[in-house]
Image (cartoon, rainbow, N blue to C red):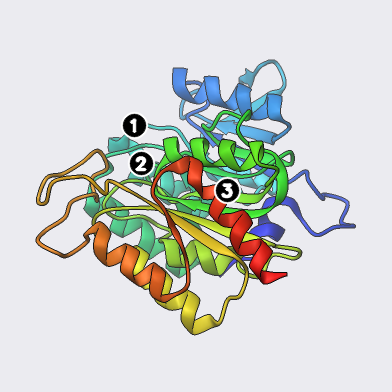
Amino acid sequence: MIDIFDTLQGKSGDSDYKKKGVIVQGITGAYGSLHAKNMMAYGTNVVAGVTPGKGGQKFEDKVPIYNTMKEAVDATGAEISIVFVPAKFFLGAAKDALNAGIKLLVAIPEHVPIRDTMEVLSLANEKGAVIIGPNTPGIMIPEVIKIGIMPPSPFKAGKIAVLSKSGTLLYEISDALTSAGFGQAITIGIGGDPINGTRLIDAFDMVKDIPDLEGMVVVGEIGGDSEEILAQRIMDSKFDKPTVAYIAGRAAPKEKRMGHAGAIVMGTYGSAESKVSMFNKANIPVAKRPAEVPVLLAGKMEKSR
């Protein structure tokens, strides 16, 4: 697995520290254009855009646009790409990126056909690359780099990792943490499609050894068993940093799909009760509402001192 911090920002002391290049696929579309501007305003080093047929143009009069990812990667050496194309074009765009050497691909589109996602994940595994998403708000190191559609205001640099299935809850809970004085070392929205390139357990493995990490927040939801698997991994790895969780959809009726494509409970499978029970077994308190997250985290950190 790639070193996520090294891929995003380089190692402290490197000449390219905090200046890792990002390619935006679909940079000339309305959605891609808007968020490319927002990322650049945040300080993200957008080095190229890719839109087939528009090679040779410039975005905002300074970012070169290429027809293919190979051209963009050859010209910039970038290892990070963010994809803003419609879901039906995602497979082609992702394959173009991975075959060109991209090592971290952030997939924004939602409702990507499952077969397409599976094909992309197989290629990513073959190439040693990581996919965040599909249907993700993105990934960021606050005050360093933002690769996604998240608003910057909820986030502040700090030492807490936030892993979330939900984009909206990622913003809300990060804002609550920030207001309580808990800045974030990194935040990852893993995505809401049924199949994601990065599961909660994968995101945990990416961030658990971040230097100076002081705690972790996990934002899960009903459906599937990724929270239970993560809780078991936390126990098995003897991860001892203060960790708290929140489970969305606790009041959802059984066998009804709620919002995210993967958020469906069948009988007791994927229920909030099973997730809360497993987190409690791992000594991870589960907040009943988002505003309670920083309160529980403060309590856990006080006990760990």
Residue at left 55%, top 63%?
A: 243
- The amino acid type found where label 2 is placed reads Phe
Front-most of 139 and 131? 139
Comparing 164 with 6, the one in front is 164
Amino acid identity at mark 3: Pro
The residue shown at (58%, 59%) is 216
- Coordinates of residue 76 in the picture (x, y in percent): 70, 43
Residue at 35 percent across and 71 percent down: it is: 278
| Residue that numbered label 3 is attached to | 294
Q: Nearer the viewer, mark 1 or mark 3?
A: 3
Task: Name the residue carrying label 1.
Answer: 86
Residue occupied by mark 2: 90
Compared with 44, 2 (above or below) is below
Q: Is residue 178 visible?
A: yes
- Which of pointers 3 and 2 lies earlier in the amino acid sequence? 2
Instruction: Please determine whether, in this image, residue 90 is positioned above or below residue 27.
Output: below
Callout 1: helix, strand or loop?
A: loop
SS at badge 3:
helix
**Circles 2 and 1: CB distance less than 8 Å?**
yes
Q: Position of 294 compared to 121: left or right?
A: right
**Element class at badge 2:** helix
Q: Quadrant of residue 41?
A: top right
Residues at marks 2 and 1, CA–CA distance in whole angstroms = 6 Å
